Amino acid sequence: MPKKLIGVLALQGDAPEHRQTLSDIVGADRVVLVRSPADLEKVSALVLPGGESTTLSRLLVATGLRQPLIDRTKKGMSVLATCAGLILLSKRIEPAGSSRDPLPLGLLDVRVRRNDYGRQTDSFEIPVEVKGLRGGAFEASFIRAPRIIEVGKRVSILAKVGGSAVVVREDNRWGLTFHPELTQDDRIHRLFLETSGLL
Ligand code: GLN
């Protein structure tokens, strides 16, 4: 049986770091950078990286990836969305009102508020206990992170910081407000792959 491939959306943002973490776990031959609908067809799971959600949103439309990504996720493709990726995956994004705002994909039933922990200089690292993760707290790096301000009934909260959810899951869709790809700790990527039957 051919080996199942894992994609990293590589239009903008920290795709290289996710690719590295995943390659170290499953081997570089199983990790594909996704830039087109044809790339997306090859993969069984997709990582939506952090970056700038406004730019990513625009590029998803320009590359023709937006609708296929929605369709594949609804059919069960596993998605791990971090930071700007989570903003895109969500149902509602605040603040809203400008035509330049990112367009939510509407795949994860959460409402998020962009940059709600402050500016770039307010970025921080904090140990986070994540449900299902063995081996102690995860040192989580928050960089101009969005805050999850509302969580739908079908969404499980796997970790919280200061009362706000920071890791959530709805079936095949995972959302993190921080950046697991920026540490040497690969346990969250492993948990995602294991749960998705890819490890
Ligand atoms: N502030 C960015 C946004 O709103 C997200 C930051 C990140 O992905 N590190 O798109």
Image: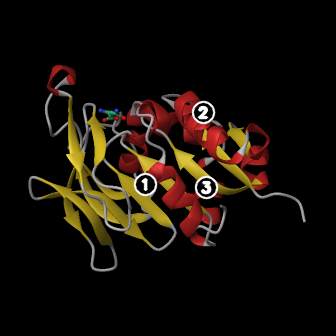
Examine the rendered structure and indicate whether residue 166 appears above or below residue 48: below
Q: Earlier in the sequence, mark 3 or mark 2?
A: 2
> Cβ of disc 2 within 8 Å of ligand 1?
no
Q: Split into 4 quadrants, where in the image is the N terminus?
A: bottom right
Please state which of the two labelled residues, at mark 3 or mark 2, is closer to the viewer.
2
> Pointers 3 and 2 in contact (CB under 8 A)?
no
Point out residue 168 in the picture as x, y percentages from the top left corner: 33, 63
Q: Earlier in the sequence, mark 2 or mark 1?
A: 2
What residue is pinned by disc 1? Answer: 89
Examine the rendered structure and indicate whether residue 93 appears above or below residue 119: below
Few, some or many C-alpha atoms within 10 Å of disc 3 (few <14, some 14-19, many ≥20)? many
How far apart marks 3 and 2 lie (CA) works out to 22 Å
At label 2, which amino acid type do we have?
A: Gln
Q: Nearer the viewer, residue 136 or 2?
A: 136
Helix, strand or loop under label 3: helix
At label 3, which amino acid type do we have?
A: Leu
Q: Is residue 134 left or right of residue 126?
A: right
- Check the image and name the residue furthest to the top: 121
Q: Residue at x 48, y 45 (%)?
A: 186
What residue is pinned by disc 2? Answer: 20
What residue is pinned by disc 3? Answer: 69
Helix, strand or loop under label 1: helix
- Check the image and name the residue furthest to the right: 1
Q: Residue at x 25, y 60 (%)?
A: 159
Q: Name the quadrant containing residue 118.
A: top left
Give the total number of marks visible in the rendering.
Answer: 3
Query: Does residue 46 appear in this view?
Result: yes
- Check the image and name the residue furthest to the front: 135
Q: Residue at x 79, y 46 (%)?
A: 38
Examine the rendered structure and indicate whether residue 94 appears above or below residue 192: above
Point out residue 94 in the picture as x, y percentages from the top left corner: 22, 47
Q: Nearer the viewer, residue 120 or 63?
A: 120
